[in-house]
Amino acid sequence: MTVTEVTRYEPFLGRHARTGTWPELARGTYRVILEACEAGDWGVATQLIPLTLLEAEELHQIYGAWPGEILEWLHGQGLDHDVVDAEHRRVLAVTSNGLDLAWEESWQRYVALTDDAAEAAGRHDPSTAERVIAARDTWRSAHDQAVDLIYGLLDVGVRLLGEDCLPVMWDHLMSSWYDEHARRLDVATQPWSESARQLSLAIVDGFHGHLAGVDRLGDVELIEEPDRVGFRFAPCGSGNRVMRDDTTDGRPRMEEPYLFSVTTKPHDWSFGSAGVCSYCVHCCLLNMTMPIDRLGYPTRVIEPPLWPQAREGGTCTWWVYRDPSLVPDSVYEKVGRRAPHREGGPS
């Protein structure tokens, strides 16, 4: 029997990724796997189960590194080390029951469970779907705990230095990303049509790894408009998740016992809005302010969830414009930038 190839090597990612139409790619990888198991489509299941590890690998790397890098940055700001360490313990107490994340151990357990599910699919085992769910649940638990920890450590910076420290902290964490994104997504480097494709594929691929959607299967809503394509997360799985009642068991991280920070006033680096969670700030910097400053246009335009409105079903939407010249002036102005001069351009 001929097996349909549902993955292929993607050069800009340096690894395999899913193939298909945009509506197909917007569906969560775990959802597609579970449907394949139910239908007995073992060829699809055996290809996609290992791919979930690739979709999560970047998060494995950065979530393993960022907590230590944030603490290192905090200790370098002239703060009392005992105070920083006490704040760290406070965050650990509410995010991991007083125990530091056994991050690598959690990841290795997830890998082992995923490998087990892939082997089960290879032998057409009826229990494959249960094994897939066990792997997904392990990743979800580790992922969400890591996001909470990172958010909490960012909150330490806000408590001790004020919210204006957030863009500085994120610049410290993402400087290498800035350089790579600016180099690759420059219209002088490659056509915007290819950049838009890469940006869009990275969105669906990345948010499969974040387990977007209330069901936490990685689903993304696709929105096609004449001048742009939108990707809506309900929620995104990381910053948006921490705001909602339905994805935090009724305990948004802005409330007790967490009390993690959101911006108290609009900033250029917070989408020009108050109520942006400290974790979500990095999306504004990476996709909007940094590329505008370096390239002259945003690479993605983001409509973030805002606290407290987001607690009852708030979403996050990312837009990729079909050409940078189509980005409205209002997008630039919202993040404190001046739109480029263009004859008859969008306003």
Image (cartoon, rainbow, N blue to C red):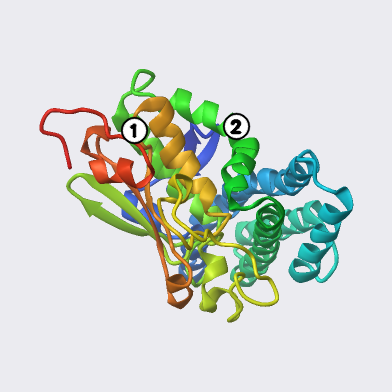
Please provide percent x and percent y for residue 72: 79, 41
Which residue occupies the foreground of this view, 152 or 39? 152
Residue under label 2, please give it.
Answer: 175
Q: Give me the residue at 67% from left, 58% from top.
A: 155
Which residue occupies the foreground of this view, 84 or 43? 84
217 to 326, vertically: above or below:
below
Q: Give me the residue at 28% from left, 48% from top.
A: 229
Label disc, if present, on residue 239 of the rendered structure = none
The three-letter code of the residue at mark 2 reads Ser
Q: Residues within 10 Å of mark 2 (few under 14, many from 20)?
A: few
- Distance from Cα at disc 1 to Cα at disc 2: 18 Å
Label disc, if present, on residue 297 of the rendered structure = 1
Please provide percent x and percent y for residue 271: 42, 50
Whether residue 112 is visible, yes or no, is yes
**Dividing the image into 4 quarters, which one contains the C terminus?**
top left
The three-letter code of the residue at mark 1 reads Tyr
Q: Give me the residue at 32% from left, 40% from top.
A: 332
Please provide percent x and percent y for residue 250: 58, 81
Secondary structure beneath label 2: helix
Q: In this view, does 240 lie to the left or right of 195?
A: right
Q: Is residue 50 left or right of residue 222?
A: right
Q: Is residue 158 left or right of residue 95?
A: left
